Image (cartoon, rainbow, N blue to C red):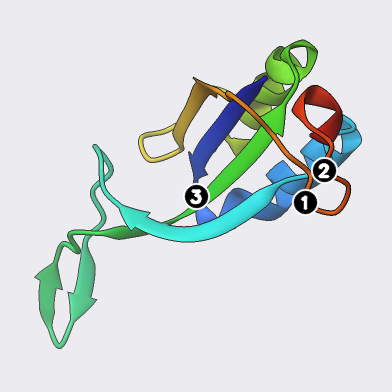
Amino acid sequence: MKLITAIIREVKLDKVREALIEADIKRITVSRVSGHGQQRIEEMYRGQIIVPDLIPKIKIEIGVNEEFVDITVNTILKAARTNSEGAVGDGKIFITPLEECIRIRTGERGGTAI
């Protein structure tokens, strides 16, 4: 089992979610987060140009069994890119081992609980 965490642009959430549903991945967790990387956005505030330290993003977390890792990652990659080549600020995907998953309602454990 793996935990896939994707940090994407806010405007890409609907496109990514719809693509995941099409790929038969329907169980996701979405959070609003802030951060910064290489992306630089300048904004005008009261006549002065400012560069915000933290940029709003969306964090998607998906617990998957091994056979769904590549499908999930490829789906997010295609849907979250700004264009065919991508752009600075499109986000990142992290894949980490998921030691255990337990469904609270039934007590199921492991891959069947995902």
Residue 112 seen: yes
* Image mark for residue 104: 1
The residue shown at (50%, 49%) is 9
Q: Which mark is residue 87?
A: none
- Residue 79 visible in this rendered orientation of the protein: no
Name the mark nearer the viewer: 3 or 1: 1
Q: Residue furthest left?
A: 48
N-terminal-most mark, 3 or 2: 3
Relative to 20, 13 lies left or right:
left
- Of all residues, the one furthest to the bottom in this rendering is 46
Give neighbour class at mark 1: few <14, some 14-19, many 20+ (Cα, 10 Å).
few
Depth order, front residue of 62/46: 62
Res 107 label: 2
Residue that badge 3 annotates: 9
Instruction: Decide which of 46, 23 is in the foreground and name it.
Output: 23
Q: Secondary structure at mark 3?
A: loop
Which mark lies nearer to you, 3 or 2? 2
Q: Residue at x 70, y 42 (%)?
A: 16
- Report the amino acid beneath label 1: Ile
| Residue 23, x across and y down, in percent | 86, 29
Disc 2 from disc 1: Cα separation:
5 Å
Nearer the N terminus, badge 3 or badge 1?
Answer: 3
Please tell me whether residue 15 is drawn above or below residue 108 in the rendered image.
below
Residue at image location 13% in from the left, 68% down from the top: 50
